Image: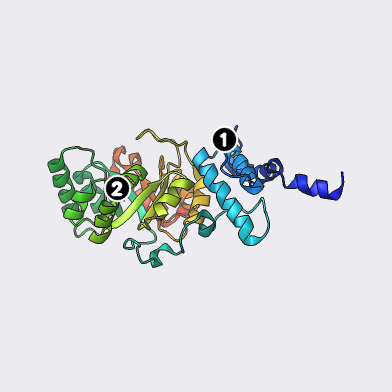
Amino acid sequence: MNTSKAMTELHTPEAIARSIVAAHASRFGEFAGDIASFSSEDPIYRGAKQACSALGFIDIDAECLARAWQAQTKRVGMFDAHAWPEHPADFGMRSFPPGAREDAFPSCPEKLGLYSVLPDAQWVGRMARAGVPTVQLRFKSNDDEAIAREVNAAVQVVQGTGSLLFINDHWRAAIEARAYGLHLGQEDLDALTPEALKTIRDSGIRLGVSTHGYAEMVRADAVTPSYIAMGAIYPTTLKQMATAPQGVARLAAYARLMRGYPQVGIGGVDAARMPEVLGTGVGSVAVVRALVADSNPEAAAVRLLRIVADPANAR
């Protein structure tokens, strides 16, 4: 084979895909990828999308990664199969750190620590008094009056505890009650009208957003929230997830890309798994069943707080 032909074959989409898979399969795993479509003829893009699909990323995330790999290659002037994309600009995101942007939501601590997701105000007060630094009220109801009562009660019970309270979903009630923060799922964020988003931003409330992969992180970054939640890391029975568990290898890659944000890892985390989650670089770990399903939640909170403080010496 002559030299020019050999060089051409080294840069075919198939060869690019093989080199990326060979470089990253040991941490992400290898699967039978199913590509819905391609949106470009560029060989770097096509090879990267094939590879990311083979590494188990869903189509929308494989597309996002492929575009980032194409941008990265153009930016640095060469293709490197080992250089997993982790530069925000390659994903089309605006300047980092995001907190310096004019439209950024108010800041919150870089490390939110142990983050407890709780079903009602009574639980919120209980865990706040136990010393959990960040608590979220996830109250499920379609009754506006009941929602307002529960949100107001949660705001009241955290006063004097030092805990930061985020309200899940109910943004109007959260603003009215002057809660510290609001947490929205990706679908809730996408469903907001521009006017509603402006109302939330203008209120001065902190905003956290759930994400489940690269495409959702890019969409969340567009509104510059106060923190980014990433998951589900492990299998969870609490809600039906549209994506498979992400695992700690992906979480670590997400954390490197989004390192300008406070980050929360969530989904199926318990005491045994917490050290490896913290090892990815996230500054906070959210738990649900690890506290509310424990026979002694206060004691469980103490154990988890010790792990967050010193993951290397977890017992």
- Is residue 3 visible to us here? yes
Q: Is residue 106 left or right of residue 89?
A: left
Residue at 26% in and 55% down:
200
Residue 238 position in % (x across, y down): 35, 35
Residue at 54% in and 42% down:
62
Residue 258 position in % (x across, y down): 47, 56
Numbered label attached to residue 76: none
Residue 189 position in % (x across, y down): 33, 47
User: How many marks can you see?
Assistant: 2
Report crowding for label 2: few under 14, some 14 to 19, many 20 or more residues within 10 A (C-alpha). Answer: few
Color scheme of the displayed model? rainbow
Looking at this view, is 129 or 286 the one in front? 286
Q: CA distance from mark 2 to mark 1?
A: 30 Å
User: Which of the two labelled residues, at mark 2 and mark 1, occupies the earlier sequence position?
Assistant: 1
Q: Is residue 288 left or right of residue 218?
A: left
Residue 52 position (above or below residue 165): above
- Is residue 154 visible to us here? no
Residue at 68% in and 45% down:
16
Residue 134 position (above or below residue 107): above
Looking at this view, is 175 or 233 the one in front? 175
Q: Is residue 200 left or right of residue 88?
A: left
Residue that lies at the very extreme toward the right in this rendered image: 2
Report crowding for label 1: few under 14, some 14 to 19, many 20 or more residues within 10 A (C-alpha). Answer: some
Q: Amino acid at mark 2?
A: Leu
Q: Which residue is mark 2?
A: 192
Q: Which residue is mark 1?
A: 35
